[in-house]
Image: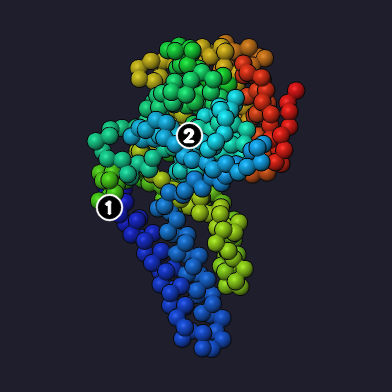
Amino acid sequence: MKYMLTYDLMESMRNTNQWLGATARAYASYPIMSWGANPTIDWLKAWGEVTERTFSRMVVKPDWGIPSVSMEDGKDHDVKVEMVLERDFGDLIHFKVVGRQPMARRVLLVAPMSGHYATLLRKTVMSLLPDCDVFITDWHNARDIPVSAGKFDVEDYTLYLVDFMKKLGSDIHVVAVCQPVPLALAATAYLAEEDPTAQPRSLTLIGGPVDPEANHTEVTDFGRSVTMGQLEETMIQRVGFKYAGVGRMVYPGLLQLASFISMNGETHANAFRDQIIRTAKGEAADHDKHNTFYDEYLAVMDMTAEFYLSTVQRIFKDRDIARNAFVVDGRPVDISKITTVAVKIVEGEKDDISAPGQCLAALGLLTGLPESKKAAHLEPGAGHYGIFAGGKWRRNIRPLVLDFIDANSDVPKPARRKSGKVVALK
């Protein structure tokens, strides 16, 4: 599998399916096709539209598309995406609300590098912007990074987080979602020894695999059942000539997408069938619920081979974080050294990616942290996506996170906006 030919073959298959969809749509759109009533043509056009859009989205990085924010002055303020720190494998960006005074709450969202772009957290960003100054880690697609930029594994990821936290200062509150949860914990412990004054005020860990063995899922079962040699031979490919990262060894986003879809294959198949039916009936829209979700879900990025393999080896197989045996750049990282950073755990009752207990294991590692600075929340009925986006996040989890941030800040509690009104916090 570790050949450019394999990578280019996957891209050719994707491109061919996109072309087939475009061809079917164009053919069915010819005026001559409307001379007689023929439902087959309507179905062909609908299939073409859905198929073309589906396969075209797989190679496009979604825009942030953050709408304006309504503030207490009664005006809508535009949101600009600003570069704070630019690096080869990922940037630190800031969502600046134009014309707004500095906010007391400053939040760093640590986005996952697990096949999707950081825009997967767009709704999380939108929900926090009215009440917080929001920063996020914006990871790059490995296929676009030249080989000359070097490697990027879990240790490099951790050091990136260390640099981002240093850049933002000690009044930052870190919220890590999914895959980076154990590495955000490690980065904070790294700072606890290297530069204690640069540690964040609080650390909110949402649905991440601190200890994958705490509660098994299909993801953890897969990690245990295959050898590293099998993974390297079957999952790793070399970027083809079409991209700037030509020759770089990667875990392709298309393979990761196939894995995602296979976990709930019937659900996805039904969703696309229903969308074709709606399109044929003229009931679909460009930004309807299906397109809004799948435009993001299908947009995937490649990970560097070393990041993917080291994640499986050190987080899932060896359980370096769970055993408090993680090493970064030759330096052991002792999580018990975290003594001042408040830590909150958020898990979903029905999370099938990082099941309840996997993230909660972090509290057991924080032996140097007072119990008063530890907190945990299990959201009833919530799946993996629901604990950082959607109704359960907005109604139940987000208020708890903001309260936790306020409880561990040295500044007075600011007003919180709700439904266009300002609510004073006591």
Q: Is residue 415 left or right of residue 90?
A: right
Q: Secondary structure at mark 1?
A: loop
Q: Identify the residue shown where x is 54% and y is 43%.
A: 78
Q: On screen, 168 above or below 224? A: above
Mark 2 sits on what residue?
A: 94
From the top left corner, tell me how far across and down residue 335 is, in percent.
51, 16
Amino acid under disc 1: Lys
Distance between mark 2 and mark 1 Cα atoms = 31 Å
Return the residue nearer the eye: 287 or 412: 412
Q: Identify the residue shown where x is 48% and y is 52%.
A: 298
Answer with the quarter of the image where residue 154 lies: top left
Residue 230 shows in the view: no
Amino acid under disc 2: His
Q: Secondary structure at mark 2?
A: strand
- The answer to whether the residue labelled 2 contacts the one labelled 1, judged by CB atoms less than 8 Å apart, is no
From the top left corner, tell me how far across and down residue 208 is, in percent.
55, 32
Mark 1 sits on what residue?
A: 242
Name the mark on residue 373: none
From the top left corner, tell me how far across and down residue 354 is, in percent.
57, 36
From the top left corner, tell me how far across and down residue 19 is, in percent.
38, 67
